[in-house]
Amino acid sequence: MNRTILSHDNLHPTIKDKVAGFHHATIAELQDAVAQHRIVVVGMRYNDAVWKARKVLTKAGLDFHYLEYGSYTSQWRRRLALKMWSGWPTFPMVFVDQALIGGASDLIALLNAGQITLQKK
């Protein structure tokens, strides 16, 4: 099932470029990282769930690329752009083989259930 989003056709012409360009460079940076790395974790400083996902992957000896966008008091617009683009409402965002698998608890559940196979370094 696809998430419903407002159609580009329903945007007033004066805001279409603003909507399309909202932190485009941040989204492009993530897309490039996902294309270049098998595992990507997107997070922010001081977030326990982000720390947990990184710790689980490190403890398992799995190589991953980490992108950090500010903290609770900075770069929130960049994080908002990523949330709007992905549809995922929280951090971290964990990508495996170019697919968003969810956050830290989703990563842990999938690893524990053997539902995803991750290649070691």
Image (cartoon, rainbow, N blue to C red):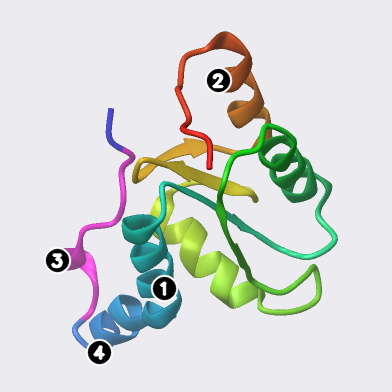
Residue 17 point in image, percent of width and height: 26, 86
Q: Amino acid at mark 1?
A: Glu
Q: Which mark is residue 9?
A: 3
Distance from Cα at disc 3 to Cα at disc 4: 12 Å
Point 37% across, 79% down: residue: 24
The answer to whether residue 46 is magenta is no
Residue 99 point in image, percent of width and height: 36, 40
Distance from Cα at disc 1 to Cα at disc 3: 27 Å
Residue 35 point in image, percent of width and height: 31, 58
Compare marks 2 and 3 and give the one earlier in the sequence. Answer: 3
Q: Residue 37's quadrant in the figure?
A: bottom left
- All told, the count of numbered labels is 4
The answer to whether residue 8 is magenta is yes
From the image, tell me which residue sits under label 4: 14
Q: Secondary structure at mark 1?
A: helix
Distance from Cα at disc 2 to Cα at disc 3: 38 Å
Q: Residues within 10 Å of mark 4 (few under 14, many from 20)?
A: few
Compare marks 1 and 3 and give the one earlier in the sequence. Answer: 3
Q: Which mark is residue 29?
A: 1
Residue 40 point in image, percent of width and height: 51, 52
Compare marks 3 and 4 and give the one earlier in the sequence. Answer: 3
Q: Amino acid at mark 2?
A: Leu
Q: Is residue 33 above or below residue 21?
A: above
* Residue interval drawn in magenta: 3-12
